[in-house]
Image (spheres, rainbow, N blue to C red):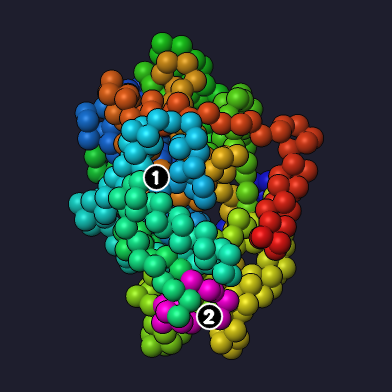
Amino acid sequence: MLRQEQELTRGSYYEASVTRPAPAAPLAGRVGVDVCVVGAGYAGLSAALELAERGYTVAVLEARAVGWGASGRNGGQVIAGYGHGGEDTYEAQFAPADVRRAWDISMEGLQLLQQRITRHAIACDYTPGYLSLAVNARKARALQQRLEHMAQHYGHEQQWVSPQEIAQWVASARFHAAAYDPASGHLHPLKYALGLAAAARAAGVLLFEGSAALHIEAGAAPVVRTAQGEVACRYVVLAGNVYLQAMGPALAPTLGRRILPVLTYMIATEPMRRERADALIRQRAAASDTNYVLDYFRLSADHRLLFGGGDSHRPAPLPKVAAGMRRLMLQAFPQLHDLAVTHVWGGQVDMTMNQAPDFGRLGSNVYYLQGFSGHGLALAGMAGKLVAEAVAGQAERFDLLARLRHRKVPGGPLRAPALQLGLWYYQLRDLIG
């Protein structure tokens, strides 16, 4: 699977539009620190940065390179709240006061992202604004009810875009109505991940790339082993999401059944004239439809349309992906038929069954962060802050989210068929309403 996914990273617009620093050396020999973090994505880097700023010594083990996983290949959308319907999960399980606390944690994640961009001078093309787009009248009614619910119960105000106004917001006949959220936005995800890594290293974090964690020797003083070295520590933070299982079954055998790896794809067009790009989406907001199997898109800083979707449970050949994604893009924007697709890539998103995040502990001193369900840009950064609080003995907020109950995903030979059946089920719901 990793070999196939590596092929899907080679055409990434994000990789083509950054200059990575020289790779960090792999771990060799034995290192002793307070905390070992596994995974150099948003969650792991955020945890490392927060812990270092609190005075802890930290080592980060990354199997590939900083931001190689979802943190460097996602849609770049910085969205308030939790996954599609994630708030409903909290409302079903928590008392109203705790539901509001969970919501406030997600909103703090948006603020934290902005603070880090400013404090660490991370040039990542941040642009405010996000559109939730309904494709028909029935979905528009549901979206408007959701907008009113969020305002009434969470104080989260969004602007309703009526069918009469929608053409002023997005130049597409596909969409019926929308909700505009000024608190959300979008950015270049790999630039942001590399910026977090630079900030963490400046704070004293030891970062080792090409260093897959293979085994954890649990206990009061855990040891995390790689192929060429080991980290002795007091705490471990597992932030590898779907890739933890690829590193080896001995690392965290119980976590794989708690999340679904879903492949999603993106394409980038050739650059447009700025005026043409500006005419596509008002205020150059990020956007996605409200379908269960959704399409999402935004404009890049160099005036390309970045368009994503096409959820699947296994990789497809790049030419097939590019052709399929281009068809989806032209369904929304047929006026872009003359633009070539210059980049195509994909990657795995870690979904939970209820699309709310999955945080917890394995024993008393091994923490895990996963299941961001498409909302990881802000939420994974906040997760890093919460786990740092927990390590420091202030676990109230971490434990609030860790209380959430999750259904397990079928394992063994049933896993892939169950995922495909689930995708077909949601596609059918989108079709028939």
Give the x, y percent position of residue 416.
75, 42
The answer to whether one can see residue 108 in this image is yes
Residue at 29% from the left image edge and 39% from the top image edge? 49
Give the x, y percent position of residue 413.
79, 35
Q: Is residue 293 above or below residue 391?
A: below
Q: Which residue is mark 2?
A: 172
Amino acid carrying mark 2 in the image: Ser
Residue at 28% from the left image edge and 20% from the top image edge? 393
Name the residue nearer the viewer: 89 or 403: 89
Q: Is residue 136 above or below residue 119?
A: below
Give the x, y percent position of residue 362.
49, 20
Q: Residues within 10 Å of mark 2 (few under 14, many from 20)?
A: some
Residue 319 on the magenta span: no
Label placed on residue 69? none
What's the magenta bit mostly, secondary-structure-wise? loop
Q: Is residue 408 above or below residue 417?
A: above
Give the x, y percent position of residue 386.
33, 33
Identify the magenta region. Answer: 165-177
Q: Which residue is mark 1?
A: 379
Name the residue nearer the viewer: 99 or 68: 99
Amino acid carrying mark 1 in the image: Leu
Residue at 37% from the left image edge and 34% from the top image edge? 96
Q: Quadrant of residue 122?
A: bottom left
Q: Is residue 231 above or below residue 414?
A: above
Q: Quadrant of the C terminus?
A: bottom right
Q: Is residue 128 left or right of residue 68?
A: left
Secondary structure at badge 2 equals: loop
The answer to whether one can see residue 23 in this image is no
Name the residue nearer the viewer: 423 or 100: 100
Q: Marks 2 and 1, Cα distance to the nearest angstrom?
A: 30 Å
Residue sitting farthest toward the top = 220
